């Protein structure tokens, strides 16, 4: 082992203090087309209007950069989530409220992501849209192609999705619109003392 | 290709505006023991005192998390730098001043890191300490072990270091102390209009 940890003068607390906030990871999980990115985007916009310092880590966008060497096999999905969780932790160290939006189909990897940080620094958000509804919406036309056999390892069809057992926040997208759902997330952050402003 | 870019409402500019700063990557390169981490730490501390929002990406620390699957072969060094550069770009998108501190021995990879972002968003900082001086200091005892043949692929000895051709900032650590060098970096940021405060 020829590496040692470098201890820095500034830590998470000092960086967060400057931003006047408590850093946190909001981890949004759900099927493709469930509405994760749309809700993440609205939540970030609302937090920004309250003066909060945020960053969105979007699974699809990361696959154009950091994770562009990864495919959709089970092992690559695991590595995809591992890297995203590590980056989220670094962003947390930077003092930010980090909104992760990625299918993250496996319970085990979501648990690993959670265990990287403190218990009060991670909230799992289940963007709960029934598979039938995702197939009906099919915003990117991916389900049609997956059903036609054009896309292998498609979550919900040819690859499993394991819903969270006890997510801190459970969003039912078939019942509420995006604005209501985003307000619900902010309300929960307020209730937990993470933010002060009203949604 | 079954992924599409998600367009977010908030961009780098909005996130940076909230912080009242221009986001930037300071990329510190140099031999092991050159003083990169020490200078990075001091620069961050000084920027924080000026109210600037920063994050340090330290090569050694990343190897305990995001890059813990990588060794010190040439190909793993390349992947190490690629991932660090991608994370730095994400931090830039978050509106931060990002200080990267890693040996990054190959010119080609430093160029790739630079090309990931805008021309005015990346400053290469050469932490220039002669090899003899690094061997003499040997703060972590690594050179002694590498010379004894205990550490393979050691930069400067059994693995090459390619010095920058035209770094934006050139720090001679054998001539100045860490405080003077950090002030020199801040002075350069001020001269370029990145920060307003005096070092």
Image: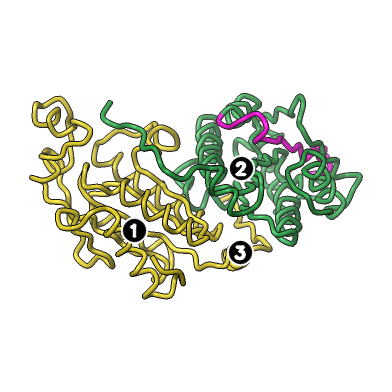
Chain colours: A yellow, B green
- Mark 3, residue position: A11
Mark 2 closeness class: few <14, some 14–19, many ≥20 residues within 10 Å? some
Q: Chain of mark 1?
A: A
Q: Tell whether label 1 touches label 2 (CB within 8 Å).
A: no
Mark sitting earlier along the chain (3/1): 3
User: Which label was assigned to residue A112?
Assistant: 1
Q: Position of residue B52 (x, y in %)?
A: 68, 55
Which corner quadrant of the image does residue A77 belong to?
A: top left
Q: Quadrant of the C terminus of chain A?
A: bottom left
Q: Secondary structure at mark 1?
A: helix
User: Does label 2 lie on the same chain as label 3?
Assistant: no
Q: Is residue B104 above or below residue A45?
A: above
Q: Position of residue B188 (x, y in %)?
A: 81, 41
Q: Nearer the viewer, residue A191 or A56?
A: A191
Q: Nearer the viewer, residue A109 or B192?
A: B192
- Mark 2, residue position: B151
Q: Chain of mark 3?
A: A
Q: CA distance from mark 2 to mark 1?
A: 32 Å
Q: Tell whether label 1 touches label 3 (CB within 8 Å).
A: no
Q: Nearer the viewer, residue B1 or B152?
A: B1
Q: Secondary structure at mark 2?
A: loop
Q: Chain of mark 2?
A: B
| Horizontal relation, residue A98 to residue A28: left or right | right
Residue B101 appears in the figure: no
Picture residue at 60% right of the left edge, 49% below the top: B17
Residue A120 among those drawn in magenta: no
Circle 2 or circle 1, nearest the eye: 1
Give the residues in magenta: B116-134
Q: Is residue A47 above or below residue A156?
A: below
Query: In the rendered picture of this protein, how many numbered marks are placed on residues?
Result: 3
């Amino acid at each position: 082992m020829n590496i040692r940890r470098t201890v820095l003068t500034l830590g998470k607390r000092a960086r967060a203090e400057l931003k006047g906030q408590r850093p946190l990871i909001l981890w949004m999980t759900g099927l493709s087309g469930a509405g994760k990115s749309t809700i993440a985007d609205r939540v970030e916009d609302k937090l920004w209007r309250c003066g909060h310092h945020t960053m969105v880590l979007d699974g699809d966008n990361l696959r154009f950069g950091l994770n562009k060497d990864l495919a959709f096999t089970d092992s690559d999905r695991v590595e995809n989530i591992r890297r995203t969780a590590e980056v989220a932790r670094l962003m947390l160290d930077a003092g930010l409220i980090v909104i992760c939006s990625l299918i993250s189909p496996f319970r085990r990897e979501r648990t690993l992501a959670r265990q990287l940080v403190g218990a009060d620094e991670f909230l799992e958000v289940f963007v709960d849209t029934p598979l039938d509804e995702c197939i009906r919406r099919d915003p990117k036309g991916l389900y049609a192609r997956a059903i036609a056999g054009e896309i292998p390892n498609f979550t919900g069809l040819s690859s499993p999705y394991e819903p969270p057992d006890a997510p801190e926040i459970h969003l039912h997208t078939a019942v509420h619109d995006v604005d209501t759902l985003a307000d619900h997330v902010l309300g929960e952050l307020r209730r937990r003392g993470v933010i002060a402003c009203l949604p």
